[in-house]
Amino acid sequence: MKRNTLVFSLIGICVLIIILCILHIRPPRPEEWDNVAIGIERAEVLKLYPDIHTMKEIKGFDVYSVKNSSPYLTDGYWQMQIYYSESNTVSSITYKYIDRNCGILNKTIVRE
């Protein structure tokens, strides 16, 4: 009897974990971010994203973030970091997904 209870409890826990993983899906990266390409000028980036966090002078890159929207149940956001060359053109782009819950959905993509 105790053994059956233990087995059913473990099966229930596994099913619960699977259901939570299915509901906790990372949203796709915003498609409009494909407008930023290696080699374009910073002025053009600032035109595309007027509310970008300009931190080039402080940290050497600009940051643009997009929070999740429904139907995604995760508490996270995508972040694009744009690095520039000496000639003020895009030299590399890093896309990060930051999951503020437990971090298992975190992801980094680098374009150089």
Image (cartoon, rainbow, N blue to C red):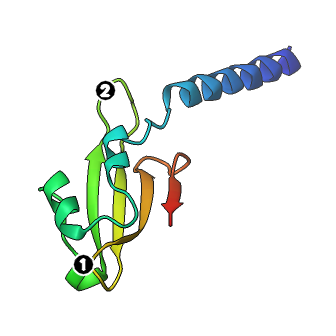
Using the rendered image of the protein, determine whether residue 23 is visible from the camera's viewpoint: yes
Residue in the foreground of this view, choosing between 75 and 11 = 75
Q: Residue at x 70, y 26 (%)?
A: 14
Badge 2 marks a residue whose secondary structure is loop
Which quadrant is the N terminus positioned in? top right
Give coordinates of residue 5: x percent, y percent.
78, 17
Q: Residues within 10 Å of mark 1 (few under 14, many from 20)?
A: some
Residue in the foreground of this view, choosing between 105 and 92 = 92
Three-letter code for the amino acid on which mark 2 is drawn:
Ser
Q: Which residue is mark 1?
A: 56
Give coordinates of residue 17: x percent, y percent.
63, 29
Residue 112 higher or lower than 47, as above or below: below
Q: Which residue is mark 2?
A: 70
Mark earlier in primary sequence (2, 1): 1
Q: Is residue 5 left or right of residue 54?
A: right
Q: Residues within 10 Å of mark 2 (few under 14, many from 20)?
A: few
Badge 1 marks a residue whose secondary structure is helix
The part of the image, by quadrant, that contains residue 4 is top right
Q: Residue at x 35, y 58 (%)?
A: 80
Three-letter code for the amino acid on which mark 1 is drawn:
Lys
Residue 5 higher or lower than 86, as above or below: above
Residue 19 higher or lower than 27, as above or below: above
Q: Is residue 25 left or right of residue 16?
A: left
Q: Is residue 69 left or right of residue 15?
A: left
Give coordinates of residue 74: x percent, y percent.
40, 37
Do residues under tags 2 and 1 come within 8 Å of each other at their CB atoms?
Answer: no
Give coordinates of residue 112: x percent, y percent.
50, 67
Q: Residue at x 51, y 57 (%)?
A: 108
Q: Is residue 1 left or right of residue 110?
A: right
Residue in the foreground of this view, choosing between 20 and 12 = 20
Using the rendered image of the protein, determine whether residue 49 is visible from the camera's viewpoint: no
